[in-house]
Image: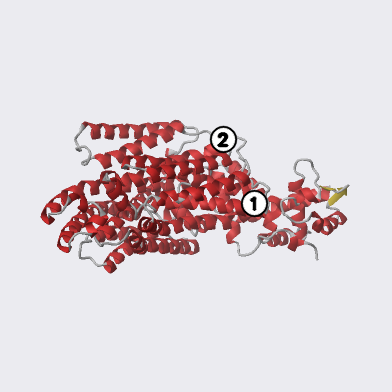
Amino acid sequence: MDTEAQPVGRGTRNAVVVAIMLGMLLAALDQTIVATALPTIVSDLGGANHLSWVVTSYLLAETIMTALIGKFGDLYGRKRMFLLSVVLFLAGSALCGMADSMLWLVGSRAIQGLGAGGLMVTAMAVIADVVPLSERGRYQGVMGSVFGVSTVAGPLLGGLFVDHLSWRWAFYVNIPLGIVVLIVASLTLPSVKAPVSPRIDYLGILFIGLAATGLTLVTTWGGNEYAWTSTVIIAMAIGSIVALGLFVAAEKRAAEPLLPLRLFRSGVFTICSIMSFIVGFAMLGGVTYLPTYLQFVHGASATESGLQMLPLVGGLLIASIGVGQVISKTGRYRIFPIVGTVLITLGLFLLSLLSNDTSYIVTAGFMVVLGVGVGLCMPVPTVVVQSTVDYADLGVATSGVSFLRTMGSSFGVAVFGSIYAHQLPEKLGPAVQAAQVDARLASTVEGVRGLPDAARTVITAAYADSLHVVFRWAVPVAALGFLTALLLKEVPLRDTARMSARDVGENFAAPASFDSERELQKLAALVVQHHKRNPAPEVLAQSGIPLTLAQAWLIMRVFRGGAESGSATLAEITGDLEVPPGAFEPLAAQLVALGHLSETLGHYRFTPTGLELFQSFIGAYRRWFLTHLADWSPENPEAFATAVNRITEQMLDRGHSLTTGKHAAPLTPA
């Protein structure tokens, strides 16, 4: 696996990072940007019974793509897959903006979701291609914050576009920004692919995709498009169960399964998976349908409904960040999902009481309860799984819990939507007759706002009553989450997992890499990031190696610059630093005088003494890193040691970890 950063200048690197972050932001925003626009979209296109699929088709496609794109990147190059993902996302966005029917919109959202899934997964892989591991922790934190920002900004931006332009601009806005990403990425990204071709679990992905789509269609169409006892629904339910069985069979045979079934032998993983599914179910279900209540019943504009959603997403973010900090400091976590699932259950129950007469202050309080409940639960599954699985399963287990959270979100929106689509005609029909108004006016936000007070009260009561049932049906699911949380055991957390608890991006992101070494790289980057000071002086002092920080830095650069030929010029050693090579001549002369380097016609190479010092430094740095992995007991120590060795070299990649984040100018000798 080639996961080392490629030599690029800092300016190029910054351009890549900005482009990648912009692409990730677009993909993350489109999970929630339609929430406040949905009532207007339904008013414009009709097809309220397909409302949930505007969100669900995006999530399902995104989830399936995340399982494929990482390995496609290893096969065909991450740059190519990133650019393909941007093109898919742009095409889907353009088609969404042009949609003239709900089915067109749903299909276009699926294309957009494929692009979004590719963007989210390849973004972190591309960052690994250009940012040295020693500096990657900072970038991981910033990129992770994109998901938190999008959770807050998505509903608000969707409302702004609806009120001041058109709901179509919630999709069109992606096009100019996406073109910028496409141009910058095509010009600056290095072409990297793994030297070893991965084995892709095509059958597993196919069958889980069919099962998830089929079950979602059953819950969406059952009782709405078709009777629950109809041939279509029964056949689809049976087909989905068969697909699920085939998925299990495929996972038993796959060389590199999407979700190894052995993981479920661990009660901790099973409990965390169920909990993650329920958290996703509750979070996006609430975020998707609350704007309908706020706009139809409270009469809020799309922008106002986005602002009025802030208590929910704010409570979620604050609780999630706070819990991550507490877990990282104390290592205790069990109480949080127990309290969190109680609050989710209570929050959904309180939302089921919303009526025409409920003030916004009370509504906001109910949203805070739900948001805090979800936030208390979100960091726990990933942290616990990272502390209990073997190194060999680190990638698939970490991805598995986030994969199931995304599936829970998709299923939650579909179930909420199915109940809503079934209830609304039953409640709205009699209300239209009682109010003696045109049914077409009663089905649009603007139409309801324009009704006389008496008629509007009757119509909005029908919407409130429909949403009562939606939230009430979600209460038992949340209660199941509480019972599941009670079964969660308190286990000692690995230090690396405690560090990752602070990373808010892990709580909101799409499924991560399915590769264990890449996940360990992310944890290693956090080790470096959270170390209070540059570890290089500590490593040198503990090892007794007779080198200054500057000398050790240049020795690492000589190793990298001369890896192929055995020798390197100063220009080759420092080519990516955008600093004149002559600035390092005094430092190189020091090492030559000490007998660590030899110089012939401007080419520097190791002497036997210098090579010995270099190897000693690598070993000392490896021992320092292993002190932070002391609580790992891998079942395959050889594979773990190989990964640690590669990661140690990458932590010292081109000597960057010997600086404080600046280039080598400060390291010239005194």
In three-dimensional space, the C-alpha distance between marks 2 and 1, rounded to whole angstroms, equals 25 Å
Q: Residue drawn at (34%, 53%), measured in percent from left and top?
A: 37
Residues 23 and 622: in front is 23
| Structural crowding at the residue carrying mark 2, measured as other residues with C-alpha within 10 Å and reported as few (<14), some (14–19) or many (≥20) | some
Left or right side of 27 for 431 = left
Quarter assignment of residue 262: top left
Mark drawn on residue 75: 2
Q: Quadrant of the N terminus?
A: top right
Instruction: Tell me which colouring the rendered structure shows.
Output: secondary structure
Left or right side of 414 for 533 = right
Give the residue number, with chain letter if any, for mark 1. 12
Verify CB contact (< 8 Å) between mark 2 and mark 1: no
Q: Residue drawn at (56%, 49%), measured in percent from left and top?
A: 520
Left or right side of 174 for 168 = left
Which percent across, then down, holds residue 512? 49, 47
The answer, for residue 453, to whether it is visible in the render is yes
Residue at disc 1, secondary structure? helix
The answer, for residue 509, to whether it is visible in the render is no
Q: What amino acid type should be assigned to the residue bearing mark 1? A: Thr
Which percent across, then down, holds residue 422? 21, 46
Which percent across, then down, holds residue 231? 22, 31
Residue at disc 2, secondary structure? helix
| Structural crowding at the residue carrying mark 1, measured as other residues with C-alpha within 10 Å and reported as few (<14), some (14–19) or many (≥20) | some
The correct choice, above or below, for 197 with respect to 325 in the image is: above
Which percent across, then down, holds residue 216? 31, 41
Q: What amino acid type should be assigned to the residue bearing mark 2? A: Leu
Residues 626 and 112: in front is 112
Between circles 2 and 1, the one closer to the viewer is: 1
First in sequence: mark 2 or mark 1?
1
Q: Quadrant of the C terminus?
A: bottom right
